[in-house]
Amino acid sequence: MDEIEIKNLEKFTATPYRQEIELQHVSHQADYVTLRVRIREIKRFTIFDIDPHTAKIWGQAMLDWAARHEAEGGAASEGESK
């Protein structure tokens, strides 16, 4: 089994449904890294391990969407999200 080292990057609560989201940097002994996205909804966990290329596409898509819709409101202020 692949041995890993995990470094916590960010943890926050998403609105409006209060999912806990955690981002982790995962270093694999096999000499590659992934970004681990852990989403907790009550007792259920969804975990994605994605490569840097996928993270870049996903992150840019989220930024683009947020820029188009930020005037519509509904987002927590930065102080509330952490």
Image (tube, helix red, strand yellow):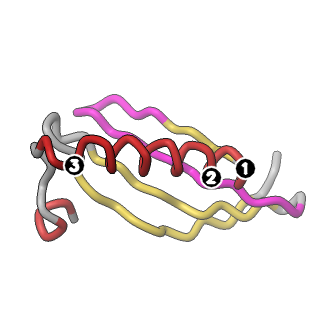
Name the residue that disc number 3 marks: 70
Can you give x and y, in whole percent of width and height, for residue 21 in the image? 35, 49
Determine which of the numbered discs, if any, sits on residue 56 in the image.
2
Q: CA distance from mark 1 to mark 2?
A: 5 Å
Which residue is rendered at x = 18% and y = 67% of the image?
78
Can you give x and y, in whole percent of width and height, for residue 42 in the image? 22, 33
Can you give x and y, in whole percent of width and height, for residue 27 in the image? 73, 64
In this rendering, the answer to whether 66 lies above or below 80 is above
Label 3 close to label 1 by CB (< 8 Å) = no
Disc 3 element: helix
Amino acid type for the residue under numbered disc 1 = His
Q: Is residue 22 left or right of residue 7?
A: left
Label 1 close to label 2 by CB (< 8 Å) = yes
The verdict on residue 41 being magenta is yes
Which SS type dominates the magenta stretch?
Answer: strand
Which residue is rendered at x = 48% and y = 68% of the image?
8
Q: Tell which circle, 3 or 2, labels the residue nearer the N-terminal end.
A: 2
The verdict on residue 76 being magenta is no
Quadrant where the image shows the C terminus = bottom left
Q: Which residues are magenta?
A: 31-46
Quadrant where the image shows the N terminus = top right
Determine which of the numbered discs, if any, sits on residue 79 in the image.
none
Amino acid type for the residue under numbered disc 2 = Lys
Q: CA distance from mark 3 to mark 1?
A: 25 Å
Amino acid type for the residue under numbered disc 3 = Glu
Name the residue that disc number 1 marks: 53
- Give the crowd class for mark 1: few <14, some 14-19, many >=20 residues within 10 Å: few
Q: Is residue 9 left or right of residue 2?
A: left
